[in-house]
RNA sequence: GGGCGCUUAGCUCAGUUGGUUCAGAGCGUCUGCCUUACAAGCAGAGGGUCGGGGGUUCGACUCCCUCAGCGCCCACCA
């Protein structure tokens, strides 16, 4: 045999991927078949493949390949995302390394650098996907900032503005001082932080306090001067320069004495009013809250309510502004350190306590968010929530697993407007144009804007130069939410044939972490712009963790490089490793050992192929064992295929793979092939050979979606194939199981048990395989067709039906029938007795339970007849087993 | 603080409307084998009473309550 005993993926994978590409097997065009459409969750254009992608893309590829083989017109559209903040940050860093500051560049210059970076790094990740075997239609590769997608975004913006769903206004937003941009609520990640709670003294102006204070007042007085003061607890002493009020709860007895007075902001010296609002928690701290309307969301609300002035003490980069008056130019966290000392020195710091609180961080730059008042663009979300909630709740769009329906509902029911503007250059520029004398127009093009501006102002002398386009870009997700539509040009040209054919798409595979960012918003855009769902099913994958359950991350260094894994175990091995550990919706604990298992499976398949390919055929009569084996495996294949189809319907992909794994390894290799295998060097009859090859062919097809490369390699070799043929596009047609099938399967289960019984005895007694054994059957089990199978598989000589078994026989039971293997002098009577007594004890207890049940009148009366009948069958079966064993025991003890 | 989910063999997980001899799978473990496709293999074996407690029921891994532990999402307590 010239074939190596190990499968060598490296010499196979590249070859077939090239073949698929050359024969254009991934591409899809509308035709009469049922479409099956998947759009890839576009990875960041400058990203590299990580384990999360691996999982995601493997699942998509499995679904797509399976659909294709089921005869659907499968179309998997790849593409990348411009990832506004992430990419801009990378470009800024790269420029910084070259000594270039973004601030010194014009928008156009910066974008030139950004495109250069994109062209340089863009699409690497798509090449990596090819290594994995992804069967995307590469001709359709798109980018969220390519022409079609960009135009779609702008058109949608204008449309929503015209519908009154987009507005511009000053609001408190999440400010990222590093990226110097606003963020949406979803881009803020709250983390617990060990910080401090500072208690600051706010002296009462005038030093006067009311007379006749009621019970329960807590008045603080200076140790030396006796001047009264209030104590405010804060985690952010650096914001006191922005204080414009102090707030107490009107129902707080401790602080009633402060009502109507004014207090002095420490260090700053500003006099601010004491206001009252029951927002303040009496129990927290001292019950006194400093109010900084410019830098806290709640304080902002108080400020609005009581008409307080707002002092913005921060610059965009998080340093203190001129407005602060103190510490100008210093970073906010440096100020916090320094102000603690300064307050203490001035005798204004009462105490400091350790405190744990939640701080919002920017998802992208990981710096603490600064709540900031600024002018931004917003999308009204109530309308979209109303659109997107029902179809998911009533399962028009199905979520797998369903638990995410709850998460989804909760978010939509509490939705807030979406801040869609970003102070970034890399992205889709907001198509709003400001007029020289105030006001603005929103239009798809500058020319259109000019026309509108002239109309609006009545000034026909206005030129393009008089208009100033908004500097901001749109949130990345404002383009991603159109992805399933814009990929088929459904925004710009909603009547085009492709869009009508491929949309709505079939399955979306993505992580639950972007359910709000992306999934929900795509559903919104889908209904708004097409009146239809964007996809029928959403399969949420888990998060990839290491085997200790830790999230994979660069900093922990626990994330293997997918390409290294592929090199080590082969793409098929890695795909299998991923899938074995990936139950839908649960996090997956990735362990390289699973890739090893995948690689081993490849070897198993490979070696089964070597065996079959090594057979010489000859004109010979087909042995009974082979006939039986073929009949049985045929049935087995139909049953497994039906089970697997069911698992696919429910997106139980790892279970489907496991079923194929067992089918191939246990049923096909260990049982079927051993049953039909000719003696060493002997030829095999034609009929058996043909049947075996046909089985192999079907098994490869079942397996192909999971392991595309090895299956193609072997499929091409089991028959002579024509150029251009591929397992990828060969139809998977397996008949439904029949009633006769289950009969055969049942009979074969018994036969397997008999074989296993004989083998177990052989094992216990350490009898060599070469030594043939006899089997005696005590009872009635139809075995005619199976005798030769038993003889072959367990090296059995004669199979005799007897009423009394030989002396010195070891026995076992299959169902209610006893089997005996005469061992003559080799029998160990005591061991045999122990074995039988153990079984008897177990069966007796089992029988006791059944009898108790049947003696229960209520059970017999209430349980369905079927169940009672079954219980009686159990009873009689068990009694018969016990009788046989007792007989056997008596014979041994004689 | 609110919501959701999880807890079944050493590990990772199945167990569909409560009832088939149902307590399962893969991996790992143990025993014996280099048997002429495969030692990255073959044959066989052991292993859990289904997180704790209570309840409903003729019958509970499955339904209800409760406690404990874990995880996730959401939330403006400084």
Image (spheres, coloured by chain):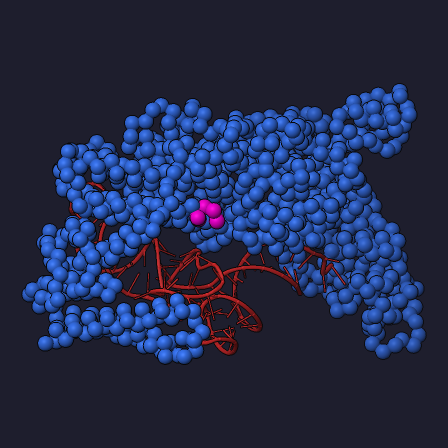
x 76%, y 53%: residue? A297
Residue A830: which quarter of the image? bottom left
Q: Main secondary structure of the magenta part?
A: helix
Image quarter (top left, top right, bottom left or bottom right) of the N terminus of chain A:
top left
Q: How many marks?
A: 0
x 22%, y 47%: residue? A628
Seen in the picture, residue A176 relative to A873 is either above or below; the reply is above
Give the side of residue A788 with respect to residue A450, left or right. left
Give x and y (percent) for residue A153: 68, 32
Image quarter (top left, top right, bottom left or bottom right) of the C terminus of chain A:
bottom left
Res A329 visible: no
Q: Nearer the viewer, residue A857 or A838?
A: A857
Chain that is blue in the image: A
Query: Magenta segment range?
Result: A646-650
Residue A716: which quarter of the image? top left
Q: What shade does chain B have?
A: red
x 66%, y 57%: residue? A358
Give the side of residue A808 with respect to residue A562, left or right. left
Res A298 visible: yes
Q: Nearer the viewer, residue A574 or A296?
A: A574
Give x and y (percent) for residue A704: 38, 38
Q: Is residue A459 magenta?
A: no
Give x and y (percent) for residue A635: 31, 47
Give x and y (percent) for residue A806: 9, 66
Q: Nearer the viewer, residue A545 or A557?
A: A545
Give the side of residue A217 with respect to residue A619, left or right. right
């Amino acid at each position: 045999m010239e074939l190596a005993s190990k499968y060598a993926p490296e010499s196979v994978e590249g070859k077939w991927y090239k073949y698929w590409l050359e024969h254009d097997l991934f591409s899809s065009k509308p035709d009469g078949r049922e479409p099956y459409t998947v759009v890839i969750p576009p990875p960041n254009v400058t990203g590299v493949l990580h384990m999360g992608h691996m999982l995601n893309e493997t699942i998509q590829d499995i679904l797509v390949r399976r659909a294709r083989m089921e005869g659907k017109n499968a179309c998997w559209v790849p593409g990348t995302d411009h990832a506004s903040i992430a990419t801009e940050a990378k470009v800024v860093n790269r420029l910084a390394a070259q000594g270039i500051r973004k601030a010194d560049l014009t928008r156009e210059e910066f974008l030139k650098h950004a495109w250069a970076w994109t062209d340089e790094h863009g699409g690497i990740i798509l090449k990596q996907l090819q290594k994995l075997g992804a069967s995307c239609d590469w001709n359709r590769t798109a980018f969220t900032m390519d022409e079609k997608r960009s135009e779609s975004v702008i058109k949608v913006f204008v449309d929503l503005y015209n519908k009154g769903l987009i507005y511009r206004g000053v609001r408190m937003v999440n400010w990222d001082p590093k990226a110097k941009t606003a963020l949406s609520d979803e881009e803020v990640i709250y983390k617990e932080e060990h910080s401090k709670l500072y208690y600051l003294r706010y002296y009462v102006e005038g030093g006067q306090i009311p007379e006749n204070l009621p019970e329960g007042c807590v008045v603080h007085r200076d140790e030396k001067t006796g001047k009264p003061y209030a104590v405010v607890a804060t985690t952010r002493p650096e914001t006191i320069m922005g204080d414009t009020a102090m707030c107490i709860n009107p129902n707080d007895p401790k602080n009633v004495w402060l009502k109507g007075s004014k207090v002095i902001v420490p260090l700053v010296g500003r006099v601010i009013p004491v206001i009252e609002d029951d927002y303040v928690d009496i129990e927290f701290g001292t019950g006194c809250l400093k109010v900084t309307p410019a830098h806290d969301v709640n304080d902002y609300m108080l400020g609005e309510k009581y008409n307080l002035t707002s002092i913005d003490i921060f610059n965009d980069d998080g340093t203190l502004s001129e407005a602060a008056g103190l510490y100008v130019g210093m970073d906010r966290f440096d100020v916090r350190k320094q102000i603690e000392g300064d307050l203490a020195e001035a005798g204004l710091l009462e105490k400091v306590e350790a405190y744990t609180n939640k701080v919002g961080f920017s998802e992208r730059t990981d710096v603490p968010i600064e709540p900031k008042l600024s002018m931004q663009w917003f999308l009204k979300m109530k309308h979209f929530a109303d659109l997107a909630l029902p179809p998911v709740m009533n399962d028009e769009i199905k979520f797998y697993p369903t638990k995410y329906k709850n998460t989804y509902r909760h978010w939509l029911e509490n939705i807030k407007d979406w801040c869609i503007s970003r102070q970034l250059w890399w992205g889709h520029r907001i198509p709003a144009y400001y007029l020289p004398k105030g006001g603005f127009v929103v239009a798809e093009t500058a020319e259109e804007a000019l026309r509108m501006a002239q109309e609006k102002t009545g000034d026909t002398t206005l030129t393009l130069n008089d208009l100033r386009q908004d500097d901001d870009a749109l949130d990345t997700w404002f383009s991603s939410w159109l992805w399933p539509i814009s990929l088929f040009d459904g925004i710009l040209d909603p009547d085009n044939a492709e869009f009508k054919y491929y949309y709505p798409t079939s399955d979306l595979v993505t992580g639950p972490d972007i359910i709000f960012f992306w999934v929900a918003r795509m559903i919104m855009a889908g209904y708004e712009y097409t009146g239809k769902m964007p996809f029928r099913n959403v399969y949420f994958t888990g998060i990839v963790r290491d085997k200790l359950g830790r999230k994979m991350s660069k900093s922990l260094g626990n994330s293997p490089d997918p390409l290294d894994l592929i090199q080590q175990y082969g793409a098929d091995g890695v795909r299998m490793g991923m899938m074995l550990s990936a139950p839908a919706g649960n996090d997956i604990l990735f362990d390289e050992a699973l890739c090893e298992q995948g690689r081993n499976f490849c070897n198993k398949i490979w070696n089964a192929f070597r065996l079959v390919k090594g057979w010489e055929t000859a004109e010979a009569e087909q042995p009974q064992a082979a006939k039986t084996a073929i009949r049985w495996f045929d049935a087995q294949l139909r049953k497994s295929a039906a089970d697997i189809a069911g698992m696919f319907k429910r997106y139980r992909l790892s279970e489907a793979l496991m079923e194929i794994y067992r089918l191939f390894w246990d049923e096909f290799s260990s049982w079927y092939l051993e049953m039909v295998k000719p003696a060493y060097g002997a030829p095999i009859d034609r009929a058996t050979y043909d049947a075996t090859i046909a089985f192999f062919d079907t098994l490869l097809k079942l397996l192909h979606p999971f392991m595309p490369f090895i299956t193609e390699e072997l499929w091409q070799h089991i028959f002579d194939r024509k150029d251009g043929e591929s397992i990828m596009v060969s139809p998977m047609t397996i008949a439904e199981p029949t009633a006769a099938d289950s009969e055969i399967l049942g009979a074969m289960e018994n036969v397997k048990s008999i074989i296993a019984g004989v083998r177990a005895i052989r094992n216990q007694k350490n009898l060599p395989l070469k030594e043939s054994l006899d089997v005696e059957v005590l009872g009635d089990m139809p075995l005619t067709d199976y005798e030769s199978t038993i003889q072959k598989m367990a090296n059995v000589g004669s199979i005799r039906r007897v009423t009394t078994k030989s002396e010195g026989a070891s026995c076992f039971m299959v169902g209610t029938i006893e089997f005996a293997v005469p061992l003559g002098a080799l029998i160990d009577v005591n061991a045999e007795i122990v074995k039988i007594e153990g079984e008897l004890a177990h069966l007796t207890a089992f029988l006791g339970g059944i009898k108790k049940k049947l003696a229960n009148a209520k059970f017999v009366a209430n349980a369905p007849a079927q169940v009672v009948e079954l219980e009686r069958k159990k009873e009689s079966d068990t009694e018969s087993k016990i009788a046989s064993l007792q007989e056997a025991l008596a014979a041994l003890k004689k």
